[in-house]
């Protein structure tokens, strides 16, 4: 089963792979005219080597769209509560919105998370590096896996550092007497950071699974899918964090 | 392999399968269980309202708060586990892959997880009846502060928690199911199945699934925050100085119940379209099938489906006209609400035109699925006409929380939705069992249900106009202003009992036909869409979904032409 995941230019297509059979490329040379480059006109399961990858990515993106709505709901609640003071009988405006400055360690955490996204992306790119993928497909060793694995481990370490950093931030806040139930702002701070941390925890689980899958799965295609989907999930959580961080830092 | 091991293996295959057809049947059985419980609850309600002192079986004399628990659980079961589960996940699992020429769903495991999470959610909800204090009593909308404070009533402690947990799980399951549907529709269409060749049911499921991803994620966030208000001493939704049972609650700060209303109805209104859009798609399909004419204005039907989905996200505020929302916002929501009536009535006019055009070519006599589709149309019009009335903030100020609203949504959503579900069951029953349902029993079921449903819900308009509020456990007692409505309510109760009894015909038909029904054969309705095509052929679609010619029964072009026929 041919399976590489890059749409290679036509001149590479015509090269002899040296092992006979169909070359593992997207487009077969058609000899001009009569070719059908639109995968949608092909039957199911024969729409090119990226068909499965596209499908899983699509599913992931829809799920993340739902997740985005979840965080949008939290953030809109944040803004509504910010403006929800009331007037007391003497016409004084009473608001229980007490902004506090976030623990500075969050800046470091943010940097760590961005770095982890970077290393995740490097790992992902390695799995799609064309020469390596060809080698893996031909059964000449696993250069892509070998190159990607350290970066995945790096991502896990950075992710755990981020979670540890969040834990320290909560410790610092509680030592200042700011607990979940203290006031409006602490509700939001803890709720937002905790739900995000939960997502990242799931992300770390996914990373572990991807790391195992990298060595266990036999098909190049499936290895690419697992790492690719984990990577997009991880990036999305990084982007969410940047927005939530800006919200907590600048908009309290 | 011995017999026992074999049956055990077969059972395991039924339980742990990811096959979409079996999952679809499971979803439908779950909905059947939910609709049975929900109907029994509604019968208890109807009896209680005219005879508050009567001892009910398994229940005893229902106290006023018991009546509210019935209202809450009836609404929750019907809206979530019947009108969401059955038309979207149930029938989509059953026929959607076949309709787009796919062998299986894009993410079958997700579909299975979604099903079993829905089952867990259902059991958690039912568990609320058996805990201390019983089921929650604040209605299926569960407005805070009463839903946020355990002291607010007998069911508001553990019962309310179970409700929230159940709905949280349901949201999770619904979003997973919707992700699977969206991915399937986009990536699993067979060769030649372009977007504009998809059956209108598939279009409806596409829009519905997108709405589910939006709406249920928001509800999930709301549920999380309400749970946190209840147990983590936050106050997102609870205002300060709340007086409950004579005690001033000082635990909460400046929360806003309006916030819950916004979040809840941002889910709640799209939910209405989640329930009704698949019904609309099915109606277009069945009208074409049984009048033997193509759908009138296919593109137009697609466009109105998309428009309804889009506007459906913008109208939630019309549930909140009298809840203390800024009146200017009310005006805006009134406008969007009347705007959504435009694509809806455009669809209705399209269907009526199809009926008019197909009056000579239609199938004689009308089969049961077609009758139920006409029933859907009738209820959708009858209930829909009161929609623009309730959309006026001024009129709504009077009609809000009266039986008029009850009549409106039971006709336009509940009865229209149920009749469309019945149409779907009668139509697609051969795909589940290989047999047709009994026509004679089906027709009895239809006419009895039609009479029962109008008899039950139409008079509620008059009760509402006379000012009878919803959620009142009884009409007699210390206040006597509503006692004059008792005869009307008695009539409604009798009609409701009649309606509920008529469903026994359906249940009997279901069981009997599954065993003894007429063998359906390959394509019993002479339909064009691909769920009726033979399973094992590779399809290449070359034409639109509703190619019927000359109004002739045998003259139609199935969407699935095999490769060899093409050449």
Image: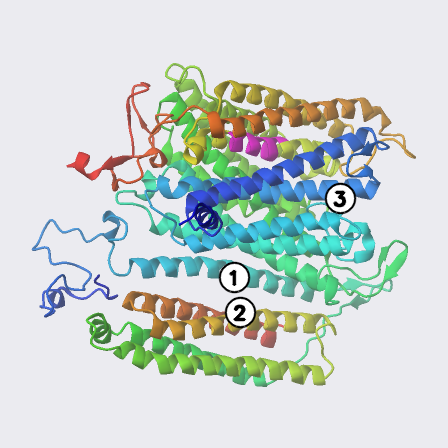
Residue B297 location (% of width, % of height): 37, 31
One can see residue B325 in this view: no
Q: How crowded is mark 1: few (under 14 residues within 10 Å), some or many (20 or more)?
A: many
Q: Badge 3: how crowded within 10 Å, few (<14), some, or many (20+)? A: many
Q: Which chain carries label 3?
A: B
Element assignment for label 1: helix
Question: Where residue A221 sits in the image (x, y, percent)?
Answer: 29, 65
Tell me the quarter of the picture where residue B49 sits: top right
* Residue labelled with disc 1: A67
Question: Can you tell which mark lies on residue A199?
Answer: 2
Instruction: Please tell me how crowded label 2 is: few (under 14), some (14-19), or many (20+) other residues with Cα within 10 Å.
Output: some
Do callouts 1 and 3 point to residues on the same chain? no
* Distance from the alpha carbon under mark 1 to that under mark 3: 32 Å
Q: Nearer the viewer, mark 1 or mark 3?
A: 3
Mark 2–mark 1 Cα distance, whole angstroms, equals: 10 Å
- Judge by depth and name the residue closer to the eye, B245 or B520: B520
Q: Which segment is the magenta one?
A: B411-422
The residue pinned by badge 3 equals B69
- Image quarter hosting the C terminus of chain B: top left
- Res B294 → quadrant: top left
Q: What element carries label 2?
A: helix
Q: Looking at the image, which residue is at 45% across and 79% down?
A: A156
* Marks 3 and 2, how far apart at CA: 35 Å
Q: Is residue B249 magenta?
A: no
Residue A111 can be seen, yes or no: yes
């Amino acid at each position: 089963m041919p399976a590489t995941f890059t749409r290679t230019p036509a001149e590479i297509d015509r090269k002899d792979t040296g092992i006979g059979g169909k070359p593992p490329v997207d487009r077969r040379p058609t000899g001009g005219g009569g070719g059908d480059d639109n995968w949608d006109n092909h039957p199911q399961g024969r729409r090119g080597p990226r068909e499965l990858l596209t499908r899983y990515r699509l599913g992931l993106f829809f799920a993340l769209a739902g997740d985005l709505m979840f965080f949008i709901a939290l953030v809109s609640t944040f803004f509504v509560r910010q403006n929800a003071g009331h007037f007391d009988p003497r016409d004084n405006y009473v608001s229980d919105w007490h902004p506090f400055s976030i623990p500075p360690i969050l800046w470091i955490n943010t940097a760590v998370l961005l770095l982890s996204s970077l290393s995740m992306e490097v790992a992902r790119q390695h799995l799609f590096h064309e020469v390596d993928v060809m080698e893996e497909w031909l059964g000449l060793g696993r250069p892509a896996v070998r190159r990607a694995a350290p970066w995945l481990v790096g991502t896990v370490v950075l992710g755990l550092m981020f979670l540890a950093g969040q834990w320290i931030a909560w410790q610092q806040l509680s030592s200042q007497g700011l607990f979940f139930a203290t006031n409006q702002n602490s509700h939001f701070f803890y709720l937002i950071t905790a739900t995000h941390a939960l997502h990242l925890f799931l992300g770390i689980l996914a990373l572990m699974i991807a790391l195992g899958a990298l060595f266990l799965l036999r098909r190049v295609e499936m290895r690419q899918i697992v790492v690719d989907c984990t990577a997009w999930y991880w990036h999305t959580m990084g982007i969410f964090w940047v927005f939530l961080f800006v919200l907590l830092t600048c908009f309290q | 392999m011995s017999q026992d091991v074999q049956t055990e293996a077969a059972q395991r295959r039924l339980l742990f399968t990811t096959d979409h057809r079996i999952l679809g049947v499971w979803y439908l059985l779950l909905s059947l269980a939910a609709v049975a419980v929900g109907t029994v609850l509604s019968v208890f309600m109807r009896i209680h309202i005219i005879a508050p002192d009567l001892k009910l079986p398994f229940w005893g004399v229902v106290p006023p708060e018991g009546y509210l628990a019935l209202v809450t659980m009836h609404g929750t079961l019907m809206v979530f586990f019947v009108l969401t589960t059955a038309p979207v996940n149930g029938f989509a699992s059953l026929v959607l892959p076949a309709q787009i020429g796919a062998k299986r769903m894009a993410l079958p495991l997700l579909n299975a997880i979604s099903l079993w999470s829905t089952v867990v959610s259902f059991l958690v909800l039912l568990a609320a009846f058996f805990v201390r204090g019983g089921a929650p009593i604040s209605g299926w909308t569960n407005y805070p502060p009463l839903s946020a404070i355990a002291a607010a009533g007998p069911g508001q402690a553990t019962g309310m928690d179970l409700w929230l947990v159940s709905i949280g799980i349901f949201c999770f399951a619904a979003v997973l199911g919707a992700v699977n549907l969206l991915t399937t529709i986009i990536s699993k269409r067979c060769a030649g199945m372009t977007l504009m060749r998809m059956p209108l049911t598939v279009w409806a499921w596409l829009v519905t699934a997108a709405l589910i991803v939006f709406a249920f994620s928001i509800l999930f966030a709301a549920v999380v925050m309400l749970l946190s208000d209840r147990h983590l001493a936050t106050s997102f939704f609870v205002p300060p100085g709340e007086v409950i049972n004579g005690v001033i609650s000082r635990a909460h700060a400046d929360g806003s119940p309006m916030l819950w209303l916004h979040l809840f109805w941002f889910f709640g209104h799209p939910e209405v379209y989640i329930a009704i859009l698949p019904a609309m798609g099915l109606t277009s399909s069945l009208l074409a099938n049984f009048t033997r004419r193509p759908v009138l204005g296919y593109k137009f039907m697609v466009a109105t489906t998309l428009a309804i989905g889009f506007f459906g996200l913008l109208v939630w505020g019309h549930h909140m006209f009298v809840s203390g929302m800024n009146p200017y916002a009310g005006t805006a929501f009134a406008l969007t609400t009347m705007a959504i009536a435009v694509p809806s009535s455009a669809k209705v006019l399209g269907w009526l035109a199809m009926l008019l055009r197909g009056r000579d070519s239609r199938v004689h006599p009308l089969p049961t699925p077609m009758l139920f589709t006409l029933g859907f149309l009738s209820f959708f019009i009858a209930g829909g006409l009161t929609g623009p009335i309730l959309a006026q903030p001024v009129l709504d100020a009077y009609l809000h929380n009266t039986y008029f609203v009850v009549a409106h949504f039971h006709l336009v959503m509940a009865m229209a939705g149920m009749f469309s579900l019945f149409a779907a069951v009668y139509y697609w029953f051969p795909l589940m069992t290989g047999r047709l349902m009994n026509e004679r029993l089906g027709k009895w079921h239809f006419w009895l249900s039609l009479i029962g449903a109008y008899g039950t819900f139409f008079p509620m308009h008059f009760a509402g106009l006379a000012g009878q509020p919803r959620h009142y456990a009884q009409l007699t007692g210390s206040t006597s202003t509503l006692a004059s409505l008792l005869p009307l309510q008695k009539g409604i109760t009798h009609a409701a009992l009649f309606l509920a009894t008529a469903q026994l015909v359906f249940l009997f038909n279901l069981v009997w036909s599954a065993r003894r029904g007429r063998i359906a054969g390959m394509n019993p309705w002479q339909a064009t869409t691909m769920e009726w095509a033979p399973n094992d052929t590779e399809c290449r679609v070359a034409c639109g979904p509703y190619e019927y010619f000359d109004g002739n029964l045998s003259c139609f072009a199935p969407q699935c032409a095999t490769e060899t026929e093409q050449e």
